[in-house]
Image (tube, grey):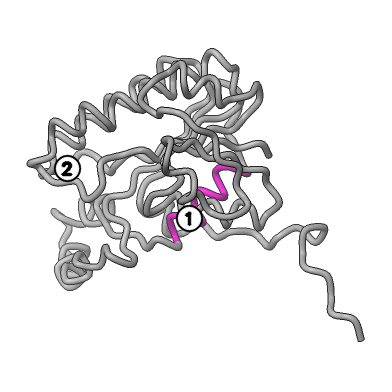
Amino acid sequence: MEILVTGGTGYVGSRLIPRLLERGHRVRALARAGSEKKVPAGAIPVIGNALQADSVARALQSGDTLVHLVGTPHPSPRKAPEFERVDLASIRASVEAGKRAAISHLVYVSVAQPAPVMRAYVAVRAAGEALIRDCGTSATVLRPWYVVGPGHRWALALVPFYGIARLLPPTRDGAMRLGLVTIDQMVSALTITVESPPPPRGVRVIEVPEIRSLRLPPQPSSLAAPASPA
């Protein structure tokens, strides 16, 4: 597939791009001037601004899959202005650019919702989802709550509390919806959604339990590494 990734040098994107390349896809990564050297090896850097629709549109081709990963790093309530300036502005730009370029599939990492905390962040991501539903492009929305991995492990301290909450009927649904996913689970789920788009104009939503359960199929034999000579 022909894939453009925005936010490809970040926490998730820097791990997703190598996985997509391993599976034989051609990947371009939108990067700010000066950041192109951070794009994972094998991907094609495209200089642009993810907050501007014109810039994103120039990086797209008809039929592309657009994976939107731009967002404020380490979200917290005090970063509410950044959510509007970066998170919402960037998905608005991607949606508009995708319509202009007639892309085939938009993949968006949102956040689990509803949620009792991080209201500004959840509101911005929900607004991004609304933009996607209104645009008429085939799309997949993934809703993780917290993605555990290198530099993002503090939430592991909450695992015992999640275990208790899942046992109690009043809190069971919330504990499942707002559960933790690992970075490997997230990358696998994104790869699967890229390779299995929804029907034309369809919007698919993938919640935490499904993100955890998705398993990447074996790599096609035509892309497998050649056997070592005898």
Query: Quarter of the image containing the N terminus?
Result: top right
Query: Quarter of the image containing the C terminus?
Result: bottom right
Q: Amino acid at mark 1?
A: Val
Q: Position of residue 154 (x, y in %)?
A: 19, 67
Q: Which residue is rendered at x = 22% and y = 70% of the image?
A: 156
Q: Which residue is rendered at x = 70% and y = 60% of the image?
A: 219
| Mark 1–mark 2 CB contact (< 8 Å) | no
Q: Amino acid at mark 2?
A: Ala
Q: Which residue is outermost to the front?
A: 34
Report the predominant secondary structure element of the magenta stretch. Answer: helix
Q: Which residue is rendered at x = 40% and y = 42% of the image?
A: 142
| Residue 186 located within the stretch drawn in magenta | yes
- Which comes before the other along the chain, label 1 or label 2? 2
Residue 103 against residue 10 in the figure, above or below = above
Secondary structure beneath dot 1 equals helix
> For mark 2, what is the residue?
115
Q: Position of residue 210 (x, y in %)?
A: 43, 52
Quick check: 205 left or right of 152? Answer: right
Q: Which residues are magenta?
A: 185-195
Q: Which residue is rendered at x = 31% and y = 63% of the image?
A: 148
Nearest the eye: 189 or 12 = 12
Label 1 and label 2: CA atoms lie apart by: 23 Å
Q: Position of residue 225 (x, y in %)?
A: 77, 68
> For mark 1, what is the residue?
187
* Closer to viewer: mark 1 or mark 2: 1
Residue 229 against residue 222 in the figure, above or below = below
